[in-house]
Image (cartoon, helix red, strand yellow):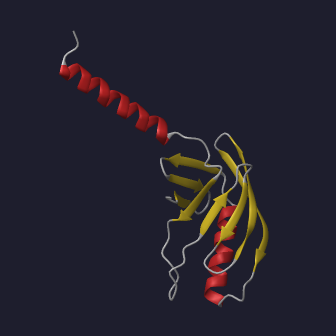
Amino acid sequence: MVSVKQMVCAAAAVVLMAGAAHAEEGFPFGTEMTLEALPQPGSKRIPNIEIGDNGEVVLELWCKGGKGQFSVAGNTVIFVPGQIQDRSCPPAKAQADDDLVAALASVETWKRQGDFLTLIGPKPLRFRTNGN
């Protein structure tokens, strides 16, 4: 006969294993994510990326927007920026957008922990999965 204590321990083990498996998920294709960053002065907008099922990316930056492409093999990732729309941005926001696109283009590896994706390169970028 199984005791209540054994059932509780077994249930706790299942929950812990599920949490560990969740932390080691694959690259978040088909996901919209927001950069962990503060908004620019005078704005509430924070950059986000929408990653398609085949790695295609729609970027909404602090002011500019555009497209790009992720290519992933194992823990290696390459981001190739596409056409970026200027949208008549103020100089400070335009520079911040250009810096973010350059940082994305320089990422080399990635790591995912639950709802967080960290793109690792000279300037690590951390994104959080957007909730429904």
Q: Is residue 116 left or right of residue 102?
A: left
Q: Is residue 22 left or right of residue 51?
A: left
Residue 87, quarter of the rendered image: bottom right
Give percent across and percent down for residue 9. Answer: 26, 25
Give percent across and percent down for residue 45. Answer: 54, 78
Q: Is residue 89 left or right of residue 24?
A: right
At a point 50% along the width and 78% down the height, the residue shown is 39
Give percent across and percent down for residue 73. Answer: 71, 41
Who is closer to the viewer here, 55 or 106? 55
Give percent across and percent down for residue 62. Answer: 60, 78
At a point 67% along the width and 52% down the height, the residue shown is 108
Residue located farthest toward the top when viewing the structure as drawn: 1
Q: Is residue 87 left or right of residue 13?
A: right
At a point 21% along the width and 9% down the height, the residue shown is 1
Whether residue 17 is situated above or below residue 25 in the rendered picture: above
The number of numbered badges drawn on the structure is: 0
Residue 75, quarter of the rendered image: top right
Who is closer to the viewer here, 97 or 17? 17
